[in-house]
């Protein structure tokens, strides 16, 4: 077999093309040290807001009664009304929320001041109310 000059040119092109298309690479990865575990932040529940209408059971002057309490945010505290079939609406003059504890201050018919201190868990409240010469346990729930 005889090598023709065009075969020589073709062979040279194949060698050059093969050399141009050859790829060589090397990658080395090493990991050292101790992995660091980070704890996700604990979700913080939204602040408690007792605003709205509540139905409360209590005893006043020896009589069991249901009282409707309507609360609204006023400045840094809470205000609203207490009402029942037994008495006209009474304005809440001061309401302070600390954590889950709500303390309400209101005037009473004797001219004195009454207080209601309740702990709120979700849509339920429990605690007590008092005024000079009267008071009782309190339980209530958020009205829908």
Image (cartoon, grey):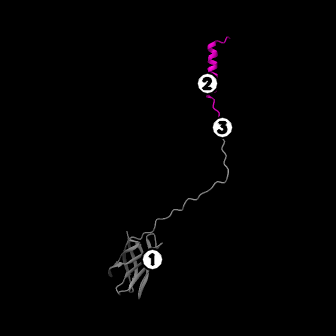
Q: Tag 3's secondary structure?
A: loop
User: Residue, x 64% and y 22% (percent of image)?
Assistant: 15
Q: Quadrant of residue 62?
A: bottom left
Q: Which residue is mark 2?
A: 17
**Mark 1 burial class by Cα count in 10 Å: few <14, some 14-19, many 20+:** many
Q: Secondary structure at mark 2?
A: helix
Q: Earlier in the sequence, mark 1 or mark 2?
A: 2
- Going from N to C along the chain, the mark reached first, 3 or 2, is 2
User: Mark 3 = which residue?
Assistant: 26
| Residue 118 marker | 1
4 relative to 114 in the view: left or right: right
Which quadrant holds the C terminus?
bottom left
Task: State the CA–CA distance, disc 3 to disc 2.
Answer: 22 Å
Residue 93 in percent (x, y) is at: 37, 78
Percent of width and height locating residue 124: 44, 72
- Corner quadrant of residue 87: bottom left
- Name the residue furthest top: 2
Range shown magenta: 1-25
What quarter of the picture does the N terminus occupy? top right
Residue 84 lies, in percent from the top left, at: 34, 79
Between 17 and 100, which is closer to the camera in this rendering?
17
> Which of disc 3 and disc 1 is earlier in sequence?
3
Is 144 situated left or right of 26 in this image? left
Q: Which mark is residue 85?
A: none
Residue 69 sits inside the magenta stretch: no
Q: Is residue 29 above or below residue 61?
A: above
Q: CA distance from mark 1 to mark 2?
A: 88 Å
Which mark's residue is nearer the viewer, 1 or 2? Answer: 2
Q: Is residue 43 above or below residue 95?
A: above
Does 143 sit left or right of 44 as displayed? left
Q: Position of residue 81 (x, y in %)?
A: 35, 76
């Amino acid at each position: 077999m005889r090598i023709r000059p065009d075969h020589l040119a073709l062979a040279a092109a194949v060698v050059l093309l093969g050399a141009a298309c050859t790829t060589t690479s090397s990658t080395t990865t090493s990991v050292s040290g101790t992995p660091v575990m980070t704890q996700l932040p604990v979700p913080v529940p939204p602040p408690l807001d007792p605003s709205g209408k509540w139905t409360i059971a209590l005893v006043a002057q020896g009589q069991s009664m249901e009282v409707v309490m309507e609360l609204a945010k006023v400045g840094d505290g809470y205000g609203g009304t207490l009402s029942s079939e037994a008495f006209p609406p009474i304005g809440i003059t001061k309401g302070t929320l600390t954590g889950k504890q709500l303390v309400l201050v209101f005037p009473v018919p004797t001219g004195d001041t009454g207080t209601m201190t309740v702990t709120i868990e979700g849509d339920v409240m429990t605690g007590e109310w008092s005024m000079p010469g009267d008071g009782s346990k309190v339980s209530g729930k958020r009205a829908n």
